[in-house]
Image (cartoon, grey):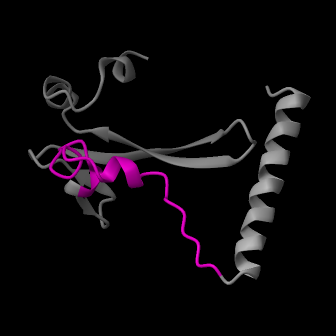
Amino acid sequence: MQTSNQLLRQSVITIKKRKNLLRLDESNVNHLFKYAMFDKEQKKGYKPSARNLTNWHYDDKEDSYTHPDGWCYRFHHVKHQKTQTDFQQEIKVYYADEPELALKRDCISTNIINT
C-alpha cells in the first residue's frame, strides 16, 4: 500500500510530465517516447533468443504458442490482478503440454513450477 506522500509525489510527477508535453505541443515540437520494451529489444541476444515470444508460433484457433523447439503451451485460464496503482490487469495463463521438457530446456524457472 502506498503512503499519501508517495501518492502525492506520483501525482506531482504526472502533472509535470503533462505540462512538459503541453509545452512541446504548443511549440510544435514532435516528441517521441520509448515504449517499455525498446531498450531490451535493441540488445543482441534478444532477437534470436527462444525466450523471446515473438520467435514462437501462435495458433489462434487453439489459442496456443509453440516454442521454436516444438513443444506447445496451451491457454489454461485468465488471471485478474491489480497493480500498485489500482490498474486492473487481465493476464492469460498458458501451461506447457510437456512441462518436463520446458523445465529441462531452462525455458521456465523452477520457482514458477514449485509455487
Query: Against 98, is 46 above or below?
Result: below
Is residue 56 among the parts visible in the rendering?
no
Image location (x, y in percent) of residue 40: 35, 47
Would residue 104 be counted in the magenta stretch?
Answer: no
Most foreground residue, 14 or 103: 14
Give coordinates of residue 5: x percent, y percent.
Answer: 88, 29
Residue at position x 22%, y 29% in the image: 99
Q: Residue 88: percent from the left, percent from the top?
A: 68, 47
Residue 22, by quadrant, is bottom right
Q: Residue furthest front?
A: 27
In this rendering, position of residue 88 left or right of residue 70: right
**Residue shown at 35% from the left, 21% from the top:** 113
Residue 28 picture quarter: bottom right
Q: In which quadrant is the N terminus drawn? A: top right
Magenta stretch secondary structure, dominant: loop
- The outermost residue toward the left is 69
In the image, 30 versus 89, the foreground residue is 30
Q: Is residue 46 magenta?
A: yes
Residue at screen point 26% across, 63% down: 59
Is 48 situated left or right of 77 in this image? left
The residue closer to the viewer here, 59 or 57, is: 57
Q: Quadrant of the C terminus?
A: top left
The magenta span reads 29-54
Could you tell me how many numbered marks the image carries? 0
Q: State whether residue 40 is above or below residue 114.
A: below
Q: Is residue 106 above or below residue 35?
A: above
Q: From the viewer's perspective, is 61 left or right of 10?
A: left
Q: Is residue 63 visible?
A: yes
x and y, in percent, of residue 101 in the image: 14, 29
The residue furthest bottom is 28
